[in-house]
Amino acid sequence: NDGSVTASPEDAYDSEYLCPVSIDGQTLALDFDTGSADLWVFSTSLPSSEQKGHTLFDPSKSTNWKALSGYKWNITYGDGSGASGTVGTDVVTVGGTSVSGQAVEIATKVSSAFVSDTANDGLLGLAFSSINTVTPKAQHTFFDTAKSSLSSPVFTADLKHRQLPGTYDFGTIDSSKYTGTITYIDVDTANGFWEFTGSGYAVGSGSFVSSSIDAIADTGTTLIYVPDAVVTAYYKQVSGASYDSSQGGYTFPCSATLPNLTLGIGSYHAVVPGQYINYSPASGSKCFGGVQSDSGIGFSIYGDVFLKSQFVIFDGSSTPRLGFAAK
Ligand SMILES: Cc1nn(C)c(C)c1CC(=O)Nc1ccccn1
């Protein structure tokens, strides 16, 4: 029951990656999010003003739909966006991986950021089920539901830079998708995230700075959010870079040459190409950086800007771990 599904960039800046997911034959484009654990979808139960532009799941058209009476969900993401609604189970298929009895969370309310993100029909959470928001009983993620039917209890992310489709694979590690060896690192599941301790960083050709960085591998977050020491060291090497409070982050002249950012994973040095860190135009001739401060978040987030430079293994075995390889 292994599967592979394309992950297509939503826009020219790789703000998010969307994957086709079939719910009892109704196909929606979902944002696979290793930073949360709810599978929720835009639905016909939303106010019509919030439905516009999205593909809607209609449970009344699903023969395998089973409503969970009295069950509810309510999620708020770190950027302040959120959604809430009711719950049922159905057959969910991702590439070749099909599961029955999967909790599908129907949105009856979504925040404005989701309404305006019309390419996105919901999220498929791939963090640990311990942080699923359904009450009175937390539900399993798609990966947890599928795990026992997979050749091995893993999924991998091979996200691409700029306009290229990548893939999420379930159940196998495709050795044609990476080069060299895989470096594995322990994961602390206490907060429900794929959380690990990074070993440090380097900017461009500069020397590696050893420092412990508490970070999560988060496919649902666009940028890299790291400690101020890293951010300061990075933009010191970018002429014309500065913190722009009106943009809410560091910007720089779009013509700037950006240094690579190396992030240590154990003894492995993961290199994020400088071009990946020119995220998008900000205003005028300034561009917004793909590396920003994690202050106020409580941990660092290695989001898509980082993950798309690597081949990443999310190993859900009894001792969960993360694997990283160059590609
Ligand atoms: C935790 C956090 N703080 N801040 C400022 C950001 C941007 C985050 C990450 C975040 O919100 N990710 C997200 C958003 C929507 C859907 C899925 N993931």
Image: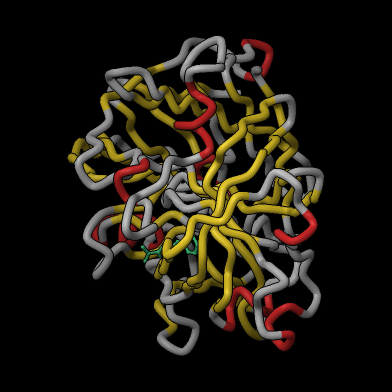
Residue 278 visible here: no
User: Residue 190 location, x and y as percent?
Assistant: 20, 41
- Give the residue at x 37% y 67%: 78
Q: Position of residue 293 (x, y in %)?
A: 33, 65
Which quadrant of the rendered structure holds the C terminus? top right
User: Could you tell me if residue 83 is visible in this image?
Assistant: yes
Front one among 84 and 320: 84
Height in image: 21 above or below 115? above
Image color mode: secondary structure
Relative to 188, is 9 on the left or the right? right
Q: Viewer-proximal residue, 128 or 68?
A: 68
Residue ID at (43%, 40%): 140
**Which picture quadrant has residue 134?**
bottom left
Q: Is residue 56 above or below residue 62?
A: below
> Residue at 74% of width from left, 85% of height from top?
48
Residue beneath the point at 74% across and 30% down: 95
Where does ligand 1 appear, by image quarter? Answer: bottom left
In the rendered structure, the answer to whether residue 102 lies left or right of residue 261 reads right
Residue 128 placement (x, y as % from top left): 36, 40
Q: Position of residue 282 (x, y in %)?
A: 61, 78
Which image quadrant is residue 287 in? bottom right
55 vs 30: above or below: below
Tally of numbered tags = 0
Nearer the observer, 125 or 285 = 125
Judge from the rendering whether residue 222 lies leftward or rightward of residue 212; answer left or right.
Answer: right
Quadrant occupied by the N terminus? top right
